[in-house]
Image (cartoon, rainbow, N blue to C red):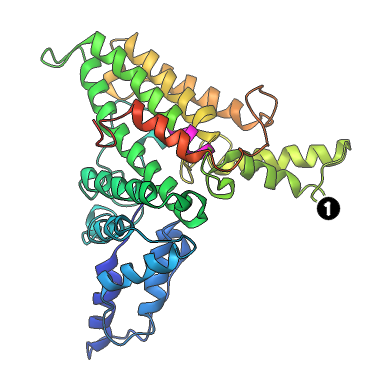
Amino acid sequence: MGLYGQVENVTINPIEALANTTSTMVGMGLTMEGQEGNEIMYDIILDQAWASTPLDTKSYFHDWVRARYHGSATSPEGLYSAWDIMRSTVYNNTDITLGNAVTKSIFELSPNATGLLNRTGHHPTTIRYDPAVLVHAWNDLYDAAAQEPSLWDNPAYTFDFTDVTRQVLANAFYPLYTTFVAAANSSVNSTYSPTTAAGTGQQMLALLEDLDDVLAASGHPEHFSLAYWIGQARAWASSTGSLVNDSSIMQTADFYEYNARNQVTLWGPTGQISDYASKQWSGLINSYYVPRWTMFVEYTLNTTTAMNGANAPLSRTLLAFEEAWQTEIWGENVEETYAMPVPGKLQGVVARVVSTWPAVFGTA
């Protein structure tokens, strides 16, 4: 999950290719996996497919925003400026050598002191834009709702605002991680600071917990909730979708839950392609990613060998946790529930998170 697009590549380049007399290209199509949840990319690609000249992306984004938020009384300028900022940066990767698909945030990956940053190719971790520009866009979106409060009741706005907030927080994990690793590395005297490492480690975990809270309050569990994902999987055990107290049905439901959990984590009995289909979902962050990073932080702070990147004890501890997590049943832990949060909580949760992380959101 991540904000990503290749606006220029899907508007200008196809038309140039079609005009090339040596080209065998006859039209355009798309596959759903590479762009993931970035809806505007699907729209612009499919509209470009029917156009003989490259679409004007600036006017296209403007009209798309106007249509997307039409349910609100007014459309403040901040909506347009936010998406225009993202159009030319976040959604405009022109160097596919750094990564040809959505950036995977490093906190979704198995924790390690090395090998997480600046990955390229498939599942890259390199952020291909200045994170500060996304913070600027986020502020424009946030200010728009201050000018037009009805946006908080607009499903399109709350989805997009949740998604952008999610990405801002995910991006903020990077500098915390690099600070932690540097401060915990006793072999580099200039940056080594156990006090800084301990404090930054706690900040990393707190940031993830606040991200979980934002996603839980989104009002869109079908997009941002592990409980929803598991609930839908378990419902397939019954032809009616209702789980009665029948041992056979419950065993089937447990099996479906195992597979639902496994797909978004280990994807294989022992992590054959671990984190391949990782998600930034409420419930998944708090129950899976936070415990993994807690283990990493504690291990790193209490050993002198954590910086070499090949830590068998930590790897064994992580895998044992990951395998055990696959077999859990949602709701057995007291904090787990299938009940979806009451709509309308996003504004208050975001206000609290912003006050906690003013530097992250550019409000300091």
Residue in front for this viewpoint, 11 or 79: 79
Residue 284, horizontal then vertical, whole percent: 53, 35
Q: Which residues are magenta?
A: 211-216
* Residue matched to label 1: 240
- Tell me if I can see residue 112 in this picture: yes
Residue in front for this viewpoint, 304 or 56: 56
Say if the magenta span includes residue 294.
no
Residue 292, horizontal then vertical, whole percent: 46, 25
Say if the magenta span includes residue 215.
yes
Residue 66, horizontal then vertical, whole percent: 39, 67
Residue extending farthest to the bottom is 21
Describe residue 41's horizontal placement relative to residue 185 as left or right: right
Residue in front for this viewpoint, 128 or 271: 128
Describe residue 220's horizontal placement relative to residue 103 as left or right: right
Mark 1 secondary-structure assignment = loop
- Magenta segment main secondary structure: helix
The residue sitting at 35% across, 38% down in the picture is 170
Describe residue 272's horizontal placement relative to residue 144 as left or right: right
Amino acid found under the numbered disc labelled 1: Thr
Judge whether 132 appears above or below 334 on screen. below
The residue sitting at 29% across, 19% down in the picture is 200
Residue extending farthest to the left is 190
Quadrant of the rendered structure where residue 20 is? bottom left
Residue 201, horizontal then vertical, whole percent: 33, 18
